[in-house]
Image (cartoon, coloured by chain):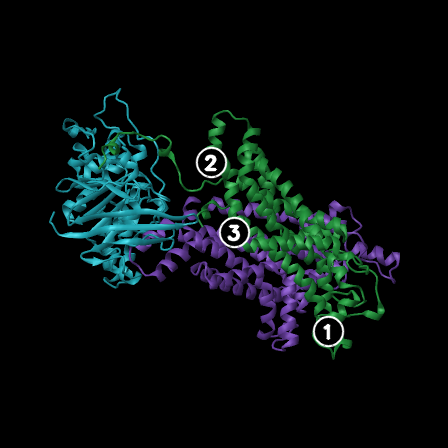
Amino acid sequence: MSDKKLIEIDNLEFSFNTYGGEVQAVRGVSFEVKEGEIVGIVGESGCGKSVTAQCLMKLNPEPPGFFKDGSIKYKGEEIITKSERQMRKIRGLEIGFVFQDPMTSLNPTMKIGKQIEEIFIERKMYSRSQMKEKAMEILKTVGISDSETRYNQYPHELSGGMKQRVMIAIALVAEPSVVIADEPTTSLDVTIEAQILDLLRKLKEDLGKSVILITHDLGVIAKLCDRVLVMYGGKIVERGTVDEIFYETRHPYTSGLLSSIAGLDKKRDDELSPILGTPPDLFSPPIGCPFAARCEHAMEICIEELPKEYKISEGHSTLCWLEHEQAPNVKLKAKSYEESDLL
Amino acid sequence: MKKYIIKRVFISLITILVLVSVVFALVRLIPGDPFASEKMTPEIKANLERYYGFDKPLIVQYFTYLKNLVTGNLGYSMFYPNLRVNDIIASAFPYSFDLGMRALSMAISFGLILGIVAALNRGKVLDFTCVLIAIIGTSMPDFIIGATLQYFFGIKWGLLPVAQYKGISYTILPSIALGFYTLALVSRVMRANMIETIQQDYIKTAKSKGISKLRVIIKHQIRNAIMPVITILGPIVAALLTGTFVIESIFAIPGMGRHYVQSIQNLDYTIILGMTVFYGSFLVVANMIVDLLYGIVDPRIRVSGE
Amino acid sequence: MEQSKFRVIGKNTEKMESISRPSLTYWKDAWRRMKGNRIAFFSLILIVLYIILAVVGPYMNEFDYTSTNVDKMNYFITSPQFKDMELIESIKDMFQTGHYFGTDEIGRDLWTRVWMGARVSLAIGFIATIINTIVGSIVGGISGYYGGRVDSIIMRIVDVLYGIPYMIVAILIMVVLGAGVTSLIIALVLVGWIGSARFVRGEVLKLKEQEFVEAAKVLGVKDRTIIAKHIIPNIMGLIITNLTMAVPRAIFAEAFLSYIGLGIAPPGCSWGVLAKAGVKLMRIHPYQLFIPAFFISTTMLALNLIGDGMRDALDPKLRNE
């Protein structure tokens, strides 16, 4: 890992126009991704994590979506103001994207090999045979053994895990510097999940890529990430290293997430405690802390005013009034270090 | 795939058999006497009835007809006793086929273009125009379109010939009149499919590869949107076929449709029967081919059928 | 800052499930979008207007739809007596005679004939389609919901019947039954129910496999209740939309059959009959074609637009638009 910053996002706001008005999907998100690190974004469905990721490649449909504010810089260049034509230089070549649902994300009427090669076809980077070589090579890299057969098959002839590998192959074939993986394992079963995660880890360790991993599964985060962003209601509510998030939890939402996952460390009669309620409707987000309504530590101020970001240590910060000096001292539930081996 | 083809062929054969039987029964139920004329004497009439086999019991007639049908013999006309139905079809079918193919190719090519253009400009003036053309096309009966075209292009402005079928310029108006409904239908289906495909996840995948917008549209959007259009080819052929009845009458084209309408008015049993069987079988076979074609074109069906 | 602001109040159980977007039921939402669709709304007004005129139109002047008048044949603003007059003047003159649309080749009043024809065309369109839909829904519904042997038998029959070109069968039935409104309806129903049966069966099958129906079954809800509470409410919109789209097809079929001389026998009239008569005289008196053509086309257009509007309104995928 080096300190070179590949992506810098500052105060990003992205909204969608619907019949009832504006839905504010992303409300002022800032973070950065350094070379060779895996950044995890975790949160419930509808918290804005996918939209944020797709903003990086301008893949959200515009309209109805639109950038309201902020900036996204890739290697120092502003993305938001780029035209479609300019974006093509970044898509696939600089940033690869692995989509959520491998079942529907491959073109059903195009052969696997063709879908992988497609990145090069218009760019005239390689000859026909070189393209095929590239495709075969990447298929092997993502762990598809009989690549010759797979190359000529259609998506429906492949299993779900295979399709996800193909999706990763598509994202990787042009050797981008950053790979964004949007819930890459959600629709797969556990054994396949482990293989795919292993593959993502290798991306970082062997190829030195940066990975942005979007998930709602803290288990996946723990296994893979260097740093974690916890998103809620279109905002990042806590950020830090994996250890900081898991063992020195400072936001009640993160704490709630942690105690709602099942782990091998739980005793048989330990109950899982879900976070009751649903995330706020971003159609008209609350003025105060978005989590206030579901937070057991909520104070009056939480409803009235949005907290600022409190820095706990270098790189670890939280968006919570509990850090205010006048707030009562609350000990949030976190993982204990003893459990760490089991997670 | 083999099993699927066999099953499909079998259903088609049954359909044709049912069709022949129903039509045979219906034709015999038609009121009126085809031999009625002033000069007709009982002897001549009895002779004629023997000639056409009407003196035998209905069931015998039915099996004789089936037997002849298998050998491809559709019998003689009753209005023009020297004309074989086979000959009438042989002389008239090329006209209808030519007209039909022109209308079909025009309708499909322009229909697809219109649908694609509309979908790509969704919500804009161009989309509205395409949709308007499509709606007008599905809302105007073909004989009205035919007569209107005839009136303006033929009579009022004198640009194109309005009757007969003797050269390229003669084919233009009837092809448009016949194909307009189909054109509208194809463009509506294509537009809807295009709009549906653009919301598919794989379009986003394609975009994420940084390929050009044109390539996304052609290779990913259109390629997937065009598939379901094949499924409406069956009804399209049927619509074109019935359309020829009026279009050929209006434009005085000596095709099958015109003969068919005439023979209905003449109560010419054997021609009605023969042509209906021919039309019906033609459509059944066309439908079958469309089904099989769909299986070949769409890789998903191709494999699951194996 | 005030210390009281930092009083812990805990969870707000009311607010934590709150949805701030206006909540709409399926039908309310469909109605909201239908109302917003101005084109469909105007189409509906047009159809209602035509229906009203079909009822009262023939009484709006003193003429009968069958009585001829040799002194006023092919009377219209294009007639010779209006040759030197301004257009406005001639229209005024024509209106004063009561022949709002002029007369036909044997002097019958076209206005009266158009609205008498509307009665026939609209009645056939709606009645045949409604019967089709009812028969088709019952057959398709039973076939789709109960499945198994009943379904496979019914569907084999429907498959075979569906392969037969329906217009040809309709023509033959008309030839057998002879021209007339009743024969037209019979012919259109005999060939038309198959389409609705296939459509309804497909939709019922789709619904049957959905989790909420399976859940109801597992909970032991009776078939009758499932059909009444889950199947029918979910399928009703689609059936009505399908019906709306089928009416213009039936009107077209009537016009087509009348055009080839099989629909309505003279002196009766329908829009198809009028159009056929118009085509004959198109070279000299084009108005006799264009007047009935206008009504056939606008009716079909309006019904198609209403159907389109309804389909869009009921499509949950378009909810946010």
Using the image, name the chain to which the residue with label 3 belongs: C
Do tag 3 and tag 2 residues touch (Cβ < 8 Å)?
no
Question: As drawn, is A307 to the left or to the right of A154?
Answer: left
Mark 1 crowd level (few <14, some 14–19, many ≥20, 10 Å Cα): few
Name which quarter of the figure residue C79 lies in: bottom right
Q: Position of residue A305 (x, y in %)?
A: 28, 40
Give the amino acid at mark 3.
Answer: Gly
Residue visible at 30% across and 37% down in the picture:
A303
In the figure, the shade used to draw chain A is cyan
Give the amino acid at mark 2.
Answer: Gln
Name the mark nearer the viewer: 1 or 2. Answer: 1
Give the amino acid at mark 1.
Answer: Glu
Question: As drawn, is B52 to the left or to the right of C28?
Answer: right
Q: Secondary structure at mark 1?
A: helix
Q: Secondary structure at mark 3?
A: helix
Residue C107 visible from this viewpoint: yes
| Inter-mark Cα distance, 3 to 1 | 41 Å
Mark closer to the chain start, 1 or 2: 1
Residue visible at 47% across and 44% down in the picture:
C316
Name the mark on residue C89. Answer: 1
From this view, report whether residue B245 is shown above or below residue A268. below
| Inter-mark Cα distance, 3 to 2 | 30 Å
Q: Which residue is mark 3?
A: C36
Q: Position of residue A230 (x, y in %)?
A: 24, 40
Using the image, name the chain to which the residue with label 2 belongs: C
Do tag 3 and tag 1 residues touch (Cβ < 8 Å)?
no
Of all chains in the rendering, the one displayed in green is C
Name the mark on residue C210. Answer: 2
Residue A110 visible from this viewpoint: no
Name the mark nearer the viewer: 3 or 2. Answer: 3
Mark closer to the chain start, 3 or 1: 3
Q: Secondary structure at mark 2?
A: loop
